[in-house]
Amino acid sequence: MDLPLLLIAILPLVILVITIIAGALLRGNRHSRELVQAWADRNGYQIIQAKRRYLFTGPFPQVTSRGAQVYRVEVEVRPGLTRTGWVMCGSGFWGNDPDKTTVRWDT
């Protein structure tokens, strides 16, 4: 089999693998954003800003090895009073509790 035919033969498989990986990443990001919103709703907070952090993860330095996601948040806890902090979505080894949120407020 010559090289162009081999590439044509494996191209659909490569596209499928890339699509599956991209879909899993997008689903995980959407789920963590929903967790942050649910946490805010449960506590009566209004989210002003929530940004996902990849490298600097504040009080959760080991997060990338645990499969969790970290957000830097600013919320209005009551009219006129805002707080900032960190919300980690997922926990445990490889994020095995994907519905858990852990919060650390700035002092």
Image (cartoon, rainbow, N blue to C red):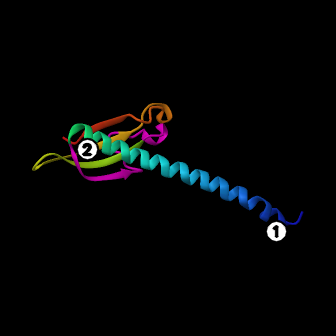
In front: mark 2 or mark 1? Answer: 1
Q: Which mark is residue 40?
A: none
| Residue beneath the point at 41% across and 35% down | 99
For the residues labelled 2 and 1, the Cα–Cα distance comes to 53 Å
Is 56 within the magenta? yes
Q: Is residue 24 above or below residue 101?
A: below
Is 51 within the magenta? yes
Q: What is the x, y in percent for residue 41?
A: 26, 42
Is 21 displayed left or right of 5 in the figure?
left
Between 94 and 11, the residue placed more toward the observer is 11
Q: Give the secondary structure at mark 2.
A: strand
Is 53 displayed left or right of 5 in the figure?
left
Count of numbered labels shown in the rendering: 2
Q: What is the x, y in percent for residue 97?
A: 44, 32
Sequence-wise, the earlier of marks 2 and 1 is: 1
Q: Which mark is residue 85?
A: 2
Q: Look at the image and tell me in which quarter the N terminus lies.
A: bottom right
Q: Identity of the amino acid at label 2?
A: Gly
Q: Do labels 2 and 1 touch, CB within 8 Å?
A: no
Q: Name the image quarter holding residue 8.
A: bottom right
Residue at the far bottom in the pictured view: 4
Provide the residue designation for mark 1.
4
Q: Is residue 49 above or below residue 83?
A: below
Q: Is residue 46 above or below residue 90?
A: below
